[in-house]
């Protein structure tokens, strides 16, 4: 059967465990250094603990090392990578091809989305160049994804939820063009979330002070079945800097969706084991969201951006219908609680406040500034929902069968899970014959049914003494049960999921002889990889350049012209070229109508 994986993010060990408990089949998290989220680092010891917890459920732990690596960091990068592998990491997610030339032992390499995996020929090459899995670019249509899946035997991983990088991943140099901070070094300053003026060739301001590049979040909840059918095997949630409530909520949501899609098909299963028991109803609108949609999955279209604000506005509650002294009413009924956070746009600015109380449809906020009739209200903090998640304990248990056998000279208790993993505990000592066999058997069955707060859920108890029923004190039986379940847990934690380590075909050529600077080759090992695959000329990586004047710092399938109804294909009165400016920084926009892409040049 084909295993399907829900892949969740984790900024730390606690969040990794919460993700597994909420239904993740795998977790990805940063190591000590060289991850694309510099604010989400973890020690090797924390990585090892997360891997051990994941392996208990047959889940996997991936470590991100998805930045470019400077020449002087190569040896350190190799050491960190090998330490992580030795600590139990199941795969490394990498951007820099130097990792293919480090002699790393016993690991899968996953090609990060930071490698801009956007074409069939590029993905086919990586599959033949030693990568077990390819993480696709987020800015792809369903048709483009389908074509890529057909082109390779490597596993395909797709993002299904979270923030969108408006630029092609790993090809953005806009942050680096403004400062020393580079997204390819995990330090993006997020210039795409800033305000810009849009001007034409004559200097006329067409749009002033709006978030021209800030796109809404991704939410492919309605397309999981389609992604399965096209060949994707891993469904990834973005958010290694998100809080635990977000990870639990979104992971539980997609876990339920994946289970339902698998139930409709034959030949598929979840990649991990265990049963999740939720104490809350997942809802993506209740935690961080920028009004998620399917981006360009269904084709390039307008309404992808959020010009008013780059922040999470949450769930829409409706428009203000009536305003009184210190209160307002909405057009439709909404249940709000004291402590809820609301926000709205007024005067071109995002304004937020808290709810003090609500009564008979009247809502009393902490302040009324900006709340007028017709204003759209959003709830960006649902106190009851967060309190519920914080107060409840989502549990993931492993179904197990306990089998008790023996005679008057000793008893044996065997535990085995649904995959056939077993553990046995034996107690050699004489027992008296039970005076009331049926009562004794019932008591033993009742005692063995309890799992004692372990990760196991005893679904079946088998008892067969073959003759006289021994009288076994409950304390003795409970101790034996704890012993066998502890042994089974240790056995499961020691089992690493099987690895799919790809073999590199050194004769397979790269599809171009000349690499431009946007490939960002910055060290000798990456150069070695490319030259061994037939590349003859490699430009200096853009991140090494002191000045990016005249450089194409962003390419994107998102188009400002299309977004505002000024598509060149449909006719536009705006004079070329167009520019966006932020403070003293100025960028020229170039539009490739044939490819339907926008380029930004400093």
Image (cartoon, rainbow, N blue to C red):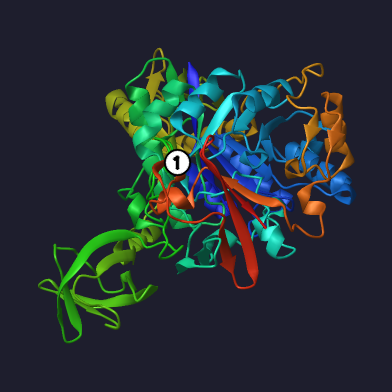
Is 359 on the left-hand or right-hand side of 337?
A: left
Return the x and y of residue 162 as percentages of the image width and height.
Answer: 47, 48
Rendered position, 137 above or below 366: above
71 vs 379, left or right, is right
Is 533 or 466 nearer to us in this picture? 533
Q: Residue furthest top?
A: 466
Q: Is residue 276 among the parts visible in the rendering?
A: no
Place residue 369 in its image quadrant.
Answer: bottom left
Q: Residue at x 56, y 61 (%)?
A: 201
Residue 480 at x, y percent in the picture: 51, 34
> In the rendered image, which quarter contains the C terminus?
bottom right
- Badge 1, how many Cα within 10 Å: few under 14, some, many 20+? few
Residue 598 in the image: x percent, y percent?
55, 46
Task: Please determine whether, in this image, residue 87 is positioned above or below residue 134.
Answer: below
Residue 321 appears anywhere in the view: yes
Judge left or right: residue 484 versus residue 74: left
Q: Which quarter of the figure has residue 59?
A: top right
Residue 320 drawn at (x, y percent): 19, 70
Q: Residue furthest bottom?
A: 325
Pick the residue in front: 375 or 484.
375
- Give the residue at x 48% y 57%: 214
Q: Which residue is mark 1?
A: 475
What residue appears at the point 50 percent right and 42 percent down from the top-left corner? 20
**Mark 1: which secondary structure?**
helix
Residue name at image x 48 percent, y 60 percent: 212
């Amino acid at each position: 059967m084909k295993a399907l994986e829900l892949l969740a993010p984790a900024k730390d060990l606690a969040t990794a465990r919460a993700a597994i408990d909420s239904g993740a089949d795998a977790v990805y998290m940063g190591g000590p250094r060289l991850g694309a989220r510099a604010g989400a680092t973890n020690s090797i010891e924390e990585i090892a603990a997360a891997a051990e917890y994941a392996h208990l459920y047959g889940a996997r732990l991936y470590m991100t090392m998805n930045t470019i690596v400077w020449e002087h960091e190569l040896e350190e990068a190799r050491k960190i990578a090998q330490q992580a592998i030795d600590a139990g990491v199941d795969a490394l997610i990498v951007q820099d091809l130097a990792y293919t030339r480090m002699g790393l032992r016993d690991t899968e390499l996953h090609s990060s989305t930071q490698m801009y995996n956007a074409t069939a020929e590029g993905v086919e090459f990586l599959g033949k160049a030693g990568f077990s899995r390819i993480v696709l670019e987020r800015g792809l249509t369903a048709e483009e994804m389908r074509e890529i899946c057909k082109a390779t035997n490597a596993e395909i991983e797709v993002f299904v939820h979270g923030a969108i990088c408006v630029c092609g991943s790993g090809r953005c140099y806009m942050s680096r063009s403004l400062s020393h901070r580079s997204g390819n070094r995990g330090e993006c300053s997020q210039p795409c979330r800033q305000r810009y003026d849009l001007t034409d060739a004559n200097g006329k301001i067409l749009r002033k002070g709006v978030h021209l590049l800030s796109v809404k979040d991704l939410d492919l909840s309605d397309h999981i079945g389609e992604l399965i059918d096209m060949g994707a095997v891993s469904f990834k949630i973005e958010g290694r800097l998100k809080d635990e409530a977000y990870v639990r909520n979104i992971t539980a949501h997609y876990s339920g969706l994946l289970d339902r899609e698998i139930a409709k098909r034959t030949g598929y299963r979840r990649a991990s084991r265990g049963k999740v028991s939720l104490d809350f109803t997942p809802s993506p609108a209740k935690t961080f969201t920028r009004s998620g949609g399917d981006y360009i999955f269904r084709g390039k279209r307008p309404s992808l951006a959020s010009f008013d604000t780059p922040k999470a506005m949450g769930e829409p509650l409706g428009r203000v219908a009536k305003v009184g002294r210190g209160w307002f009413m909405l057009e439709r009924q909404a249940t709000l609680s004291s402590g809820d956070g609301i926000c709205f746009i007024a005067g071109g600015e995002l304004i937020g406040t808290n709810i003090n109380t609500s009564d008979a449809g009247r809502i009393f906020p902490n302040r009324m500034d900006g709340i007028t009739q017709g204003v759209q209200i959003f709830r960006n903090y649902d106190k009851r929902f967060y309190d519920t998640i914080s107060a409840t304990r989502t549990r993931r248990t492993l179904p197990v069968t306990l089998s008790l056998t023996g005679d008057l000279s000793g008893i044996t208790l065997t535990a085995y899970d649904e995959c056939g993993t077993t553990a046995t505990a034996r107690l050699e000592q004489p027992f008296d014959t039970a005076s009331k066999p049926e009562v004794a058997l019932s008591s033993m069955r009742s005692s063995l049914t309890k799992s004692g707060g372990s990760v196991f859920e005893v679904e079946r108890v088998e008892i067969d003494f073959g003759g006289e029923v021994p009288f076994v004190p409950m304390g003795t039986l409970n101790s034996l049960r704890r012993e066998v379940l502890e042994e089974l847990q240790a056995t499961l934690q020691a089992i690493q999921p099987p690895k799919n380590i790809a073999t590199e075909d050194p004769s397979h050529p790269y599809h171009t002889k000349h690499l431009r600077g946007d490939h960002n080759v910055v060290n000798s090992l990456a150069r070695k990889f490319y030259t061994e695959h037939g590349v003859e000329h490699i430009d200096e990586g853009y991140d090494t350049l002191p000045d990016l004047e005249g450089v194409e710092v962003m390419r994107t399938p998102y188009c400002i012209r299309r977004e505002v109804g000024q598509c060149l294909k449909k006719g536009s009165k705006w004079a070329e070229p167009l520019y966006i400016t932020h403070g003293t920084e100025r960028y020229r926009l170039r539009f490739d109508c044939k490819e339907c892409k926008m380029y930004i040049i400093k």
